[in-house]
Image (tube, rainbow, N blue to C red):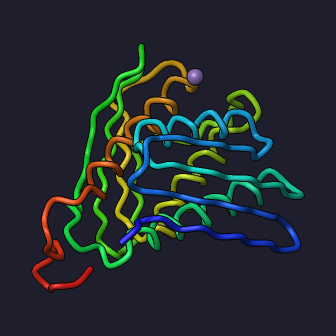
Amino acid sequence: MKRTYEVSRKTKETNIELYINLDGNGEHEINIGIKFLEHMLKTLSYYSKFDLKIKAEGDLKHHLIEDIAIVLGTAFNNALKDKKGIRRFGYSIIPMDDSLVMTVVDISGRSYFYTNIEIKNIAIEDISDDLILHFLKTFAYNSKINLHIVSFYYRDLHHLYEAIFKSLGFSLREASSIVDENVPSLKGTI
Ligand SMILES: [Mn+2]
C-alpha cells in the first residue's frame, strides 16, 4: 500500500495543490509565496523524510496559512491509510543555538494541541508568530493527532520555530514509521 496522498482544493479564498509521500526521501517543492513558512515546510519535509509538494496562492496571508494547514493535515491523515503497523507515538528534543524544544506526537485519531509558547505578535521575516502557532494548531486538528510543543527556553524566534519544525519532522517520522502489522491500540482501531 502506497502511503501517498494528492489533493487539489480551490475555494474563493485560496487555491492549493498538495502531494505527500510518507515513505519518501525528504524531497520537496514548496511554492506558497510566504518565505518563512516555505522555509519551515522545507525543514519539515527534510527531517520527516516525507516528500512534499505544495503549490498555493490566496487572497490573504491568514487564509493561505490556515488552508495549507488544513490541506496538509488532512493529506497526512489520509496518507496513513489504515494506520496498520505504525509506531503511533513519536517525540524529539531538538536544540537550535539558543532554543531548545520538544515535540510529542500521538497519531491517535483524536485532535489535541498544547503549547507553552506565548504569542508575542512579532514578525519573523514575512509572517507573525501568532500565524505560525495557528498553522501548527490547525495542522494538528486536521491530521487528527495529539501534538504537544514544549519550549524549554529560547531567545531568537526564528531559531525557536525552526527548532520546532525540525523536531516535528523527527516526531512525525517516528510516529508514522511502520514497526509491525498491528493496529497500535487496545481498542483495535485508531
Ligand atoms: Mn533559518
Above or below, 160 against 185 in this view is: above
Indicate the position of residue 40 as horizontal and vertical percent values: 58, 37
Name the outermost residue toward the left: 186
Q: What's the residue at 56%, 48% (across, down)?
A: 133
Q: Tell me the quadrant of the picture where the N terminus can be found.
A: bottom left
Along the viewing direction, whichever of 153 and 101 lies nearer the viewer: 101
Figure quadrant of residue 84: bottom left
Indicate the position of residue 161 as horizontal and vertical percent values: 52, 33
Indicate the position of residue 179 as horizontal and vertical percent values: 16, 59
> For this view, does 69 lie left or right of residue 163?
right
> For this view, does 145 lie left or right of residue 108?
right
Above or below, 96 against 21 in this view is: above
Q: What's the residue at 27%, 79% (across, down)?
A: 190
Name the outermost residue toward the top: 97
Q: What's the residue at 80%, 50% (across, down)?
A: 61
Indicate the position of residue 172 as horizontal and vertical percent values: 35, 51
Along the viewing direction, whichever of 128 and 58 lies nearer the viewer: 58
The image quadrant where one finds ligand 1 is: top right
Figure quadrant of residue 119: top right
> For this view, does 87 lie left or right of residue 5?
left
Count every numbered label the image shows and give the total.
0
Above or below, 54 against 6 in this view is: above
Figure quadrant of residue 151: top left
Q: What's the residue at 29%, 73% (across, down)?
A: 83
